[in-house]
Image: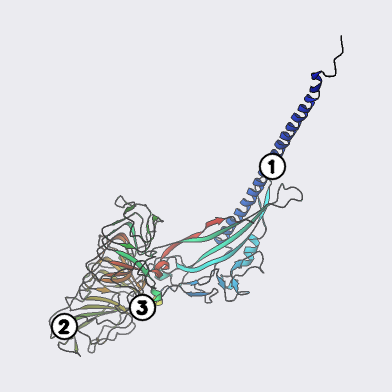
Amino acid sequence: MGMRSRSDPKRGDSGVALILVLLAILVLTTLAAAMVFSARSETLASYNYRVGTQAEYVALAGVQKALNFFNGSNYSPVPPTSSTTYYAASTYAVNPVNLYFSNATPVTCTSSCSSTGSVVLGTSSGSSLFPPSAATGGVDVVTNWVAAMNNQSISDGVGGTGNYTVTATLLEYHTVNNAFFGVPATGCSDALSGTGICRQPFEVWRVTSTGTWSSNIGGGAALPTVQVVATISPMYLPFFGIGLYGLCNVSLAGNVGTDSYNSSMGSYGGDPASYVTPSTATSNAQATGSGVGSNGGVTISGGAYSIGGSVTYANQNATSSCNTGFQGSAAGVVGSVLPGPAVPTPPTPNMPAWGYNPTNSAAADVAPPGGGGGVDYRVANIYTRVTTTPTVPSGLSCPAGFSGYRVLYTVDESSGPMPHTYTYGNMSCTGLSGSGSSADPYRLGEIDANGSGSVPAVVNIIAPAGGIADLAYVAANQIEVGTGGFINLSSTAPTTPANTSVGTFNPNSPPNVNSSLVLDVADHVNLGGTSTFNYSTATPGVPAPDFLKINILGTSSTALDLTGQSKLGAMVTVPNGGARLAGSGAGGAFFGAILANNIDVRGNYPVHYDLSMRTQSGQMFTAQVVSVSRPKL
């Protein structure tokens, strides 16, 4: 066998296989390392997610514990009737409810606190600032909070543990009436509960909960920590939170409009016979805040209109007659059209329990008698809660032993140029049955003030000047006010009418802002023509509409009927019937809020909602978590 020569080409391939093997090993080693790294990373990521999630749930448990604390017996807020104002407060609404709110955000503690600053509940007494136990019925809120919220341990039930620490800052404090004004609030400790006042604090807290997970953590590793920020607030559903609310339906047609003002800021700032839009709003006449809502549905049709707020519907039909949702165009709605919570049906007065006789008629009939040398008008002064015989025209005596009187007389205004002379006549005085309390109101049959042309008919309801502290209750079968008719609330009866020209005569005394009346009507309230009820031309919208609470028990579709150019300022409830506002021409106006089973507004009839009514009557529910966020640490 011969030997190969050195030039044999097969000798050049030696060692290639080794290189390929080494490259394959390198690739496989890299792949294996990547797989190991990926598996390790996923394990670490899963571990981090697990312990992070556990820490987050620990922090959320701290939020729940804070919610339980604010709803529990270890916490007692500062009552609104405290003799000392512990927070920076200013008047929230006018009398009679005397509600108030803190004008600082966060709320500032200003009286009898360890120092001045934001109201906080911290990790120790030194880091907390809250009014003393003397302001909270003896409950030591700070001590209870620190014991319940500082570095508290929690278990997952399978051996794992964590800890949470919670701090809280009071963002908002104001008071609300957790009752229906005019109907006694049973079970409430408020001194005014008999008048339907149950003042309770409305608090909004921001809580910061820091949670850590401490089980199955490697040695030397930092404990996983998560921080959660939540807002805790009660829910308050006002009975009069917007201008018009129907327990069944609301229907708007034609050139109608709603806007808002605040009677605590003074008179309505726009034209009473119209409504403002966003472009014509003034400082006390806004095209916002005066929404329309219904537990059933809302229908809008007809010509131009403007709803100065949102339209809400709850779709909770009590009967098949209630609509659902929204029908019509939303072009004139300044706010939004959206679902909303249902308003609870308010309690109604129990008139039969008073021994009321709805057939007793003409108890306050003041229709003008007509005739006479000049212009005659009939005046009825209804005195409530008086301890002495009221001041009446000379020669008239009133029966003794009554706390209320009805004085009727005729005033004859002479003809001819000014000054005019006036003559009293046809005088009579009768005592009113009832004591004027919620359980025993003054009982009248009909309150009629129907004038004729330029001849007025006037009813002055003279209520005490003490406001809510001396509230007067009156029950009537029906109320009728026609052209030339006026019903006024005052604390002072007119003596001698002022000289003025015939045709614009209105012998009322100026309404007094300190008098307040609850008027329960068995059947209906009808205002027509150019009549007015609790309205002052000089100060439209003032006194506040909530000084006149009208509860109508009638069931007809027009249990409240405002027609023509009539004007009314009141807080009106018609739980079983309807309210119709049907203007004709310019001049009519409503100030206040209406809660009725059905509401029908048509024609040129503006509704001016008084914002101060939002807290006057409502139902408050326990505190709840309303928002949660997780900021980055």
The numbered mark at residue 375 is 2
Mark closer to the chain start, 2 or 3: 2
Residue 65 against residue 379 in the figure, above or below: above
Residue 72 against residue 489 in the figure, above or below: above
| Residue 324 screen position, x and y as percent | 34, 51
Quote the CA–CA distance across marks 1 and 3. Answer: 76 Å
Left or right relative to 264: residue 532: left
Mark closer to the chain start, 2 or 1: 1
Residue tagged 3: 515
- Which color mode does the image show? rainbow
Q: Where is residue 141, by image quadrant?
A: bottom right
Left or right relative to 80: residue 260: left
The numbered mark at residue 455 is none
The mark closer to the camera, 2 or 1, is: 1
Image quarter in which the N terminus is found? top right
Residue at 59%, 55% (x, y): give it. Answer: 630
Q: Residue furthest top?
A: 1
The numbered mark at residue 41 is 1
Quote the CA–CA distance across marks 2 and 1. Answer: 100 Å
The mark closer to the camera, 1 or 3, is: 1
Image quarter in which the C terminus is found? bottom right
Residue 168 visible in the picture: yes
Mark closer to the chain start, 1 or 3: 1
The mark closer to the camera, 2 or 3, is: 2
Inspect the image, locate mark 3, and give the three-letter code of the amino acid beneath it: Ser
Inspect the image, locate mark 1, and give the three-letter code of the amino acid beneath it: Ser
Inspect the image, locate mark 2, and give the three-letter code of the amino acid beneath it: Val
Secondary structure of the residue carrying numbered label 3: loop
| Residue 81 screen position, x and y as percent | 49, 73
Query: Do the residues under discs 2 and 1 have CB atoms within 8 angstroms?
Result: no
